Amino acid sequence: MLELAKEYNFNMKYFDELKRSMEYLGKKKDTIFIGQAVEVAGTAMSNTLTGISKNKLIELPVAEEMQMGISLGLAMEKNIPISIFPRWNFLLYSINQLINHIDKFKVMAGTELIPKIIIRTGIGSQRPLHPQFQHVGDFSEAIQKMCTTIEVIKLEEPKQIFESYKKAYERKDGFNTILVEYGDFYNEK
């Protein structure tokens, strides 16, 4: 019955759907997870990766622009990186790579090589303790307006999560995907 519930999202919780999505991606031969607190615990997102094989996890220091550049390099080698930035506020440090390289890749390089990157970020939780405003930004709309080959998907409900990550992995339209999670929903939905 639990498997049936998972397949059809009956009573699934936000966190459970994130974990299921990461496990789905983790089983794919061409995926690799990259970022801060990926292999070593440190964020709520880390807890969604506990079922992923260690050889698929690349732990990086706090170097967001480098991380996004490495993600593009991995994708150019036919990997599908799941590049994890725990907060939008941290992802801002990688905007040069995101906007000037990843989003413009098709324009610069043509359609012979179309890298696919799944970017996972979040809006920091404010409850029960507000971490201050440098951790709770939501730049989804602004980034979407800057991009022509990147889709930003805000994950507001548990039922959206698995299908959105599956879409990001399976898409063949040349778009990369930023999936935006809500930290408060990990425990609330």
Image (cartoon, grey):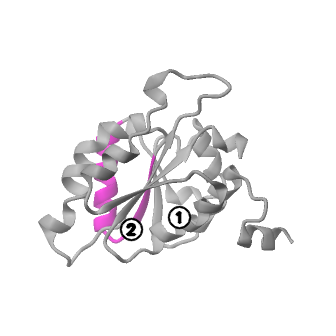
Q: What residue span does the magenta drawing correspond to?
A: 63-84
Identity of the residue drawn at 32% across and 47% down: 143
In this rendering, the answer to whether 78 lies above or below 21 is below
Identity of the residue drawn at 15% across and 73% down: 110
| Residue 67 lies within the magenta run | yes
Q: Horizontally, is 110 left or right of 29 in the view? A: left
Q: How many marks?
A: 2
Residue extending furthest right? 1
Specify few, some or many for label 1: CA neighbours under 10 Å numbering under 14, 14-19, or 20 or more: some
Picture quarter with the N terminus: bottom right
Identity of the residue drawn at 57% across and 41% down: 40
Q: Which residue is mark 2?
A: 79
Q: Amino acid at mark 1?
A: Ser
Q: Position of residue 67 (x, y in %)?
A: 34, 46
Q: Which residue is mark 1?
A: 164
Q: Element under label 1? A: helix
| Residue 3 lies within the magenta run | no
Q: Element under label 2? A: loop
In this rendering, the answer to whether 188 lies above or below 8 is above
Name the disc covering residue 19, or none.
none
Q: Amino acid at mark 2?
A: Asn
